[in-house]
Amino acid sequence: MNWYPVPGVPDVNKPFMTKVKVPGASICVVGYEGKIYAVSAICPHHGYDMTGGGWCENGKIICSLHGYSFDLQTGKGSYDYIKTYPVKIEGDKVFVSAGSIWNDIKQLFIK
């Protein structure tokens, strides 16, 4: 599994939302209530970039275009899913992985 650094995270303990592009994915990395999550940056509803005005509440990321929400941990939304990605923290640095097809298949069974 390849891990990619997430630049521009000044403090992993404070809320933040940023986008990182890795091979094959545009990922929204979110610091929310003391945890860090990584989900697809693109809302499946209309392909809107959720890092461009989206916000988090009640454990969900909200797309600012139409208000669709998706669980930060599972990716489950009101009408659809967004992909989730593995995150790791080493010291004060955050890393995400685009994973593999096998990780995607595994996610289908744990949601």
Image (cartoon, rainbow, N blue to C red):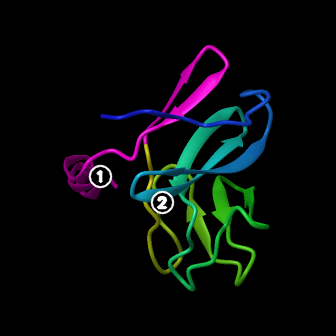
How far apart marks 1 and 2 lie (CA) works out to: 10 Å
Q: Which residue does the numbered mark 2 point to in the structure image?
A: 75
The amino acid sitting under disc 2 is Gly
Q: Which residue does the numbered mark 1 point to in the structure image?
A: 107
Instruction: Indicate whether residue 91 is drawn in magenta.
Output: yes
Q: Quadrant of residue 109?
A: bottom left
Report the front residue among 28 and 20: 20
Magenta stretch: give its range.
86-111
Residue plotted at (75% across, 66% down): 52
Residue 56: image x %, image y %?
A: 73, 57
Report the front residue among 33 and 90: 90
Residue 12: image x %, image y %?
A: 71, 28
Query: Which of the marked residues, 1 or 2, is nearer the chain's N terminus?
Result: 2
Instruction: Indicate whether residue 22 is drawn in magenta.
Output: no
Q: In the rendered view, would you say 67 is above or below 100?
A: below
The amino acid sitting under disc 1 is Gln
Residue 60: image x %, image y %?
A: 64, 58
